[in-house]
Image (cartoon, rainbow, N blue to C red):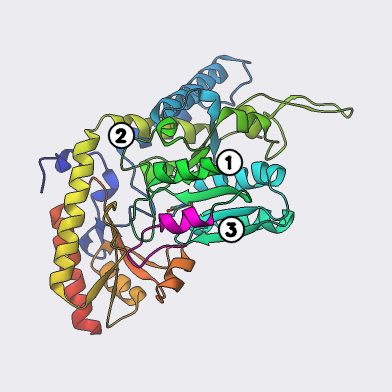
Amino acid sequence: LTDFDVAAIRAQFPILRQEVNGHPLVYLDNAATTQKPESVINAIADYYRFDNSNVHRGAHALSDRATEKFEAARQKLAEFVNASSREQILWTRGTTEGVNLVAASWGASSLQAGDRVLVSAMEHHSNIVPWQMVAARVGATVEPIPVDALGCIDVEALAAMLDERVKMVAVGHVSNALGSINPIQAITTMVHDVGARVFIDAAQSVAHWPLDVQALDCDFLAFSAHKMFGPTGMGVLYGKRELLEAMPPYQGGGEMIESVSFAGTLYNKLPYKFEAGTPNIAGAIGLGAAVDFLQGLDRQAADAHEKALLAEAEAALQSLGGFRLVGRAREKVAVMSFVSDFAHPQDIGMILDQQGIAVRTGNHCAQPIMDQYGLPGTVRASFSLYNTADDISRLMAGLEKAKMFLA
Ligand code: PMP
């Protein structure tokens, strides 16, 4: 395919060396979650083995060591997304909590009755429902930005929707259901022109190319560690400093306070104001190790490898016959969503699983776009940098079998 050394990469992922249902595992569910390299697994295990302690207490040597590693990870993440300061990197449980935090804190304090929040019609449910929840509380509306038959945001339609009542535009960088890459910079410029804010769901872009929050000029950006080779239950929310400073806390408790009294409580400074309770210390350290893993790669070569896999898989699928690609944006990550004219996606997924091939089937938590396309869901094969041409051959052989059994 390309000269990217995929064998050396695969050797770092112990989970890939196993059989499933009597066949060597072919893992093509990377948009749901990526596998973890040895370095990430070791960073988490070593933290528990040698450094485990609560952070920010300063009471003893272990606590100092844990705090140092935890805050070094925050600094690493700030540099990873080119944030201007580490105080703008808030730890979360994942993308979902990032959206909920902004919707509950910024949304509840900034949105008023009659205001409009725009989200694209192909958003993941986690970038729709939190906005609906806050909109219902304050009397605002949540409206879909049209998406065309290829899976592209209709930027002209967005331009026509923008007015002074629009206060927030929340869009995915990349669609998890279709793979489409959205023109974020163009959208941000348009949205800022009417004085609204931009929230970027970067869950599906963060593993694929370097993000630069200052170049994107987004107001908020969220992603999950587990989709970029890091652990589950961990994520990052970036925000512009003046917005984060002005926002009320999301949850109350320890860590997020400066002082507590019954006469009145003072909140902590950024980023701790938004981090109530004992944080996911091992998660932050594991995410830091995932950043090291990504930065140790030739990311352009990795991207070219994934793109070559997608092109090869899409061509092979077309020549099999009986299958139809869903989502055909020109700018796509290596996500191949498709349906067949003979069986439900779930039945195809089951036959693939019997052959040790892991794909995702269903609506991919993006029911509105599936409804728009009149589909119950799709089969989604999503490729990562450790996938190979052999994985594609196995997928195609699996689909041939599905055709034989089900057509
Ligand atoms: N947005 C997108 C585009 C996603 O793909 C996902 C995960 N499928 C999420 C948000 C939610 O991420 P998490 O479940 O890690 O919070």
Specify the label residue 223 is tagged with: none
In the foreground, 97 or 158: 158
- Disc 2 vs disc 1: which is toward the camera? 1
Residue lying at 52% horizontally and 61% vertically, measured from the top left: 144
Count of numbered badges drawn on the protein: 3
Tag 1 residue: 195
Q: Is residue 153 magenta?
A: yes
Q: Amino acid at mark 1?
A: Gly
User: Which quadrant would the C terminus be assigned to in this image?
Assistant: bottom left
**In the figure, 2 relative to 340: above or below?**
above
How far apart are labels 2 and 1 at the CA level?
A: 35 Å
Q: Percent x, y for residue 153? A: 40, 57
Q: Amino acid at mark 3?
A: Val
Residue lying at 52% horizontally and 55% vertically, measured from the top left: 119
How far apart are labels 2 and 3 at the CA level?
A: 31 Å
Tag 3 residue: 129
Tag 2 residue: 294
Question: Is there CB contact under 8 Å for labels 2 and 1?
Answer: no
- Sequence-wise, the earlier of marks 2 and 1 is 1
Quadrant of the rendered image containing residue 394? bottom left
